[in-house]
Structures are given as structure tokens and as C-alpha cells.
Image: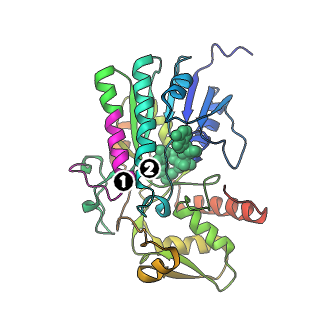
Amino acid sequence: MSTENLKKALVMGAGGFIGSHMVKRLKKEGFWVRGVDLKYPEYAETAADEFVQGDLRDPLLVKNVMSDSHWDEVYQFAADMGGAGFVFTGENDADIMHNSALVNLNVAHQAAKDKNTERIFYSSSACMYPEHNQLDSDNPNCTEDSAYPADPDSEYGWEKLFSERVFLAFMRNYGITVRVARYHNIFGPEGTWDGGREKAPAAMCRKAALAKEGDSIEVWGPGTQTRSFLYIDECIEATIRFMRGEFIGPVNIGSEEMIAMNDFAKMAIQVSNKALDIYNIDGEDFFNKYGHKCPIGVNGRNSDNSLYFEKVGWKVSEPLINGMQRTFSWINQQIIEGKKSS
Ligand code: NAD
């Protein structure tokens, strides 16, 4: 079949969690898709028509994957990232900043040079919001206009803020069309669930799946810190709707169902159908076990979706527990089959 008349999409970070789900979605819509990543997806075959394994820190590779075609949609998901155990310990700060910033600089620069992309989506993160607005676990402020004066609590957040500005600067000076969204904790099947880069939902599900009746599952910090979590299918839907609309962003993409981490652990226990307790580990105990201070992050964080609704006219609505049930089932199956993340 000729591919000439098909819409074309380029997905960077197509071997990762959100990127691999986005590739599937675009394929369902009939796009011809090229994926690029350092690695192939870990848990399923890629759905991409073409998958380039390569390093987007290399400007030549970026040129090779971007320049040879017209792109209707480009998604830039590639980043050196992980959950709290990776981004909040401080041990990976230099790599996170260097690696992700290089990728974003290369991609924005190449798009400006080629002028062959209709629009580029950049995935920023709620981690760029200032710590001083997230001290009260019951009332965090994460409206888009609260970003400045900037004071993220991690270098990961600073890099995201920098790269948002990179894409917006290239838009202003070179006329590329960009869309910038700030994701708040996306989770679901086929996401990293062990090995140190996993995020809280997967870690909670794994701990509950591995625990025996009567065991305790570990929660980092006091468990009063709050977050919200958005299921992957709604993240993809929200991203596509935003990408194809007129609003440039930055805009939050997340859930407004805020939950304290101990209650979140209880939810993981509930979906596991086991009788388990919670053990809050912090301070010296944490240090003795893991060799660094407990990476808790800000006290409170929740998505504020007012701007997204105003500009895009759609709302995420799926209850957290539904996504947790599906994620638990998938991780439990991985464990039963003896699989591990690489
Ligand atoms: P992920 O780690 O699963 O995927 C990122 C992918 O980028 C990985 O497959 C990795 O191999 C690839 N990559 C990293 N450096 C690369 C390089 N130099 N060249 C080529 N590929 C490279 O992460 P994810 O959860 O799918 O997140 C996707 C994007 O969304 C990231 O930019 C992330 O910062 C952002 N984000 C995610 C969340 C979340 O909760 N998952 C929240 C906020 C923001």
C-alpha cells in the first residue's frame, strides 16, 4: 500500500511508556508512524511502522530522523527520567539536565531549520511548579500562571522549565508551531514497574503484588504528602485533543483526584485483595536502608484543569481506582510470568 497519502507522525521516546502508547493510538487513527528511542518498548512490540534506535542527544541523528519527510505531528517525549527514587535523590541531576536539555535543544533547532513539521508537542512536567506553592498538602497551587517566580524542587523540574522556554522561544523566533503540556503523574500498564525508575503507582502495585498476607508495604515519607495520578488512556486522549486544538499552552494534563500517599497505598492494597499493613519509612531508617535521604518531593501536588477545560473543552473523568485495578492486574501478571524491567 502506498504511504504517500497517509498522515505522518514522528514520536520521540517511542520506546518509553507514554511514547509507546501514543504510537499505538496514532496507528489506530491511520497515521504512518516513525518512532525513535534509545531502546525498543520493553513490554510489547512497537506499533510503529519504522523504529529508529538511536540517541537524540546526537544532532546528526536528530537531523536524520526529522529532515527526510513532512510531519503532520511530532511528539517529543524522550527524557532521562524516572520516579522519585531517580529524580529526587540528587544523584542523577547532572545527567538529567544534560541529557534531556540536549535532546530538546536538538529537536527544536532541527524543526526550525527544516520547517517541515506542522506542529510539535513537548511533554513538560508538574515538577516545574515552585515548591513554595506546594507546602500545604491539602491546598497545593498548580495553576499554570503560578509557575513564576520559578522554584522547582528538583533539577528535573528546572530542565522541564528551561525546555518549555526553548520550544516557546523557537516558536517566537523561527515560527515553528508548538504545544506544551505539563503532565501530572501518568500511570498504567506497560510502564516501568521495577528497577529504580518506576513511579509511585507502579511501585505501590508491585509491592502489594509481591506481599504475602499480613505483610506491610513500604511508603516513603509520612504518607500525608498528596498527589494526583492520571491513567494513560486519558493522558493520550487529552494530549491528542490539546495537540490538535489552537491553544499553545503550557497547560496541565492530569487528574484532579488528589490523594494522600498512605490512602493511595491502601488503594493498592484494596485492588490486591490482600490484608496488608503500611510501613512509613523516613529519616535515618530510610538512609540506612537506601544510602540516601528519603526522596519525598513536595508536600502536596494536584492538577488544576480549569485552563485545559477552558481552552480544549474536555475533561478527564476516570476514577483513580479503575486505573489502579488495571495497572495492578498487569504488574501482577508480569510477576507471575517471572518478568523484570531491564
Ligand atoms: P519513559 O522514561 O518511559 O520514556 C522516555 C523515553 O525516552 C525512554 O524510552 C528513553 O529511552 C527515551 N530517551 C531518553 N533519552 C533519550 C535519548 N538521548 N535518545 C533517545 N531516546 C531517549 O517516560 P514516560 O513516562 O513515557 O514520559 C514521557 C515524557 O513525559 C518525558 O518527557 C517525561 O519527562 C514526561 N512526563 C512524564 C510523566 C509521567 O508521569 N510518566 C510526568 C510528567 C512528565
Quadrant of the image occupied by residue 38:
top right
Query: Sequence-wise, which precedes: disc 1 or disc 2?
Result: 2
Looking at the image, residue 24 lies above or below residue 81: above
Q: Is 15 covered by the magenta stretch?
A: no
Secondary structure under tag 1 reads helix
- Provide the residue designation for mark 2: 96
* Of residues 40 and 260, the one drawn nearer to the viewer in this rendering: 40
Tell me, yes or no, whether the two marked residues, 1 and 2, touch with CB atoms within 8 Å: yes
Q: Main secondary structure of the magenta part?
A: helix
As measured in the structure, the alpha-carbon distance from the residue carrying label 1 to the one carrying label 2 is 7 Å
Residue 247 coordinates in the image, percent (x, y)? 35, 32
The residue sitting at 26% across, 60% down in the picture is: 133
Q: Is 153 covered by the magenta stretch?
A: yes
The residue sitting at 32% across, 69% down in the picture is: 138
Is residue 239 visible in the rendered structure shown here?
Answer: yes
Quadrant assignment for the N terminus: top right
Which segment is the magenta one? 148-166
Tally the marks: 2
The colour scheme used here is rainbow
Q: Is residue 276 left or right of residue 115?
A: right
Residue 198 coordinates in the image, percent (x, y)? 56, 59
Q: Is residue 200 left or right of residue 248?
A: right
Quadrant of the image occupied by residue 273:
bottom right
Disc 1 marks a residue whose amino acid type is Glu
- Provide the residue designation for mark 1: 155
